[in-house]
Image (tube, helix red, strand yellow):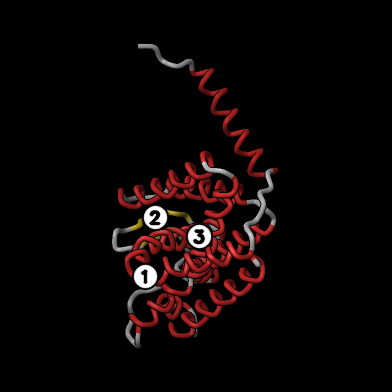
Amino acid sequence: MRFPDPATSTVAFTDVAGEIWSRATTTVQPAPSPRVVLLLAVLALALVVHPLSWHWVRHLVTVVHEAGHAFVAVLVGRRLSGIRVHSDTSGLTVSRGKPRGPGMVAMLCAGYLAPAALGLLAALMLANGRAFGLLWLLVALLVVMFVQIRNWYGALVLLVIGSALVGVSWYLSDTLQSALAYLIAWVLLLAAPKPVVELMREHRGRRTGSDADQLARLTPFPAGFWMVVFLLANVAGLALAVATLF
């Protein structure tokens, strides 16, 4: 059996990585027509609204939610202990650091704000024709997150999403890549408010251990206040992104 030359493999990997970086930073792909953008928005809304498809879309939202917690945790100087994504679409990010203070508050706020924030960033990139760059930015985020995943189901979810993104960005045409990138952006933006609404329904005056409940213990404001803040921020992000995408 003949093993590949390590030097050759390294050169091949470098060439592929260089091509990806070049395309991600320099390639500008034409935006779909306004009609196609609108149709993709309608499709994304259907995926968010329908119960069967929402279960799977919710996995993507949970991944972004937990990534938001993790990103801000590192940003404010906390130490990540691990991330979990479960089959019931729930998730958990554990970090070590001060149990109170602005850093902890920022980390708790980041989860429900992350999908809209990423969706808005996606809209800005797409407005500049960076669909390929967006797809590989998402792949890079998944790779970084994979290092911190602490359960098999969460690892599987990241692998499935990442593999799909790599396949689309590598094998499909620019037109289809752009369409998928727009669909992802719409899904993130339209899905962002729904978990907040679900949280409001589940809460109804009782503590659930949610991010809002933890914020209520750390700040003078009740959980309901934070839920309203999350909802308004997500709606504002959606409004800004709509203006950007059209």
Q: Position of residue 241 (x, y in %)?
A: 62, 68
Q: For the residues marked 3 and 2, what is the alpha-carbon distance in whole angstroms? A: 12 Å
Question: What type is the residue that disc 3 sits on?
Answer: Ala
Position of the N terminus, as image quadrant, is: top left
Residue 73 numbered mark, or none: 3
Q: Residues within 10 Å of mark 1 (few under 14, many from 20)?
A: few
Report which quarter residue 37 is drawn in. Answer: bottom right
Residue at (65%, 51%) from the top-left corner? 130
Q: Nearer the viewer, mark 2 or mark 1?
A: 1
Query: Mark 1 or mark 3, which has the lower sequence index?
Result: 1
Question: What type is the residue that disc 1 sits on?
Answer: His
Report which quarter residue 99 is drawn in. Answer: bottom left
Q: Residues within 10 Å of mark 2 (few under 14, many from 20)?
A: many
Residue at (64%, 60%) from the top-left corner? 33
Q: Which residue is mark 1?
A: 50
Which residue lies most toward the top here? Answer: 1
Q: Position of residue 98 (x, y in %)?
A: 47, 65
Q: Which residue is mark 2?
A: 83
Residue nearest the observer in this picture, 194 or 196: 194
Query: Mark 2 or mark 1, which has the lower sequence index?
Result: 1
Q: For the residues marked 2 and 1, what is the alpha-carbon distance in whole angstroms? A: 28 Å
Residue at (60%, 28%) from the top-left corner? 15
